[in-house]
Amino acid sequence: MMSSNLLVCILLAIALSTQLIVKAFIVGKASGFAAGTTGGGSIESVYPQNLQELETFLGDDEPRVIILNKEFDFLGSNGTTTEQGCRPKIMEQCIAENNGFKGQDVILREGDTTFTQTGGCDQAVGVEVTYDNAAKNPLVVKGNKTLRGIGQAGVVKGRGLWLNGDNIIIQNIHITELNPQYVWGGDAIYLQGTESGPMKNIWLDHIKISRIGRQMLVIAFGGAESLTISNSDFDGRTDWSSSCDGRHYWAFIIGGEPTHITFVNNFVHSTSGRSPKIISEMGTNPIVVGHIVNNYWADNSGHSFEPGLNAFVLAEGNLIQDTAQPILADDKATIFTAADSNDCTSYLGRACVANVLENSGALDSVNGERAMETVKEFKEISSYAPGAAMKLSVNLENFGVGLLQGTTTEQTQESVTQEEVVQDYGQSESVLRSSTCKAKRRT
């Protein structure tokens, strides 16, 4: 029969280990527009064991903290489709160049037999395409959810996420292999909006996105009223690209009515366009307000910023390296690109942090005064304290930029790695054995 002293020791050990595990899953605090996002909160974590459980946990109506401690591979899970697609003229030219890179063929919209209803089929010929169905059917993520990976184990392969609710945290996961050989092969993260209007409190942090067919991120016309994207790695390296140079073109489309976004401490590299495209053309209140701050762009063979109609953007404290065309904009765009620390004082009541460009084209403001007249009304921008432009690097212990420490820029909460949990638990266990339990065994 178990002694009462031994039972006390076991219960204490369980309590200590549970406390440490909970500590390891503190997700920190979003800065900027998504400040206050809680996701699933402090509810007990769940660990999906298979593809169906992951889909169920994400898509039900319960608040959840969903922890990924392994890879979830959806490739082949819903079969494949072989049908007619199109090959635009630019892809035929890529084949003719024979430069070691491949172009992207195009998956057609249903019923498009003339190549006129599908974007990307310019001067195209018909070709057979075979694609994985899972990537065309993203995982639905309802509101009040936290999805978090452990270390670099939380990989979602072959299927993206469709966010459709408020108060969502996606942290430390890698989305990859969404039919990268095809335009319209699949979006990594799609923000739908809700039936009642734009989504609220969405925080995407320490994520990695690579090898996808279409957009890394889409914010649809429904909008995201309070969104922060932080500390993430948007990796455009690919075997197939519309620019025929191993760099992905379709990176971001940020739209909405309205959308307010803080894009901070991210690494965007090896792309050739739409990095990001920011535009709002539809709806009763089409407007995108963006604070693009302290990010690092590198190795972009085309254009990065592509602001358009009804987008009001402040870009400051960013480092842009080896980028052919940092901005592509017409006279409808409204973007202020800080070139000097004093540029913002009269609008924001604080100094801006200048952008830094190295081996890159120019990053000039377009209708900058109009942009600042709009962004100055948002305290999430005027009260933000940006750092200096600097080179960012990915972390090998988790996904995204920098060590996952619970916050973006405001380090107010502590979190620990798996290794620290093991180490701390080992120390606690040895202390427990040498003091409390050992002493009780002597009595």
Image: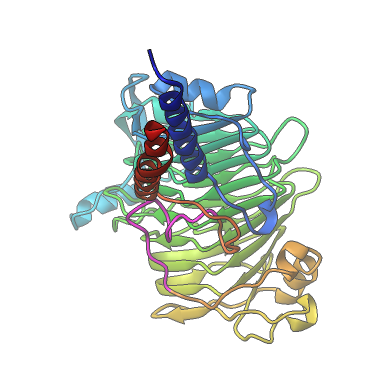
Seen from the viewer's position, the closer of residues 235 and 20 is 20
Picture quadrant where residue 349 is located? bottom right
Q: Give x and y (percent) for residue 151.
A: 37, 46
Picture quadrant where residue 183 is located? top left
Picture quadrant where residue 310 is located? bottom right
Q: Residue at x 75, y 76 (%)?
A: 369
Q: Give x and y (percent) for residue 93.
A: 28, 53
Q: Give x and y (percent) for residue 308.
A: 64, 60
Was residue 243 drawn as part of the magenta stretch in this picture?
Answer: no
Q: Residue at x 68, y 45 (%)?
A: 201
Q: Against 179, is 309 above or below?
A: below
Q: Residue at x 78, y 63 (%)?
A: 378
Q: Residue at x 42, y 65 (%)?
A: 302
Was residue 405 drawn as part of the magenta stretch in this picture?
Answer: yes
Q: Give x and y (percent) for residue 259.
A: 70, 50
Seen from the viewer's position, the closer of residues 196 and 170 is 170
Indicate the quadrant containing the C terminus: top left, top right, bottom left or bottom right.
top left
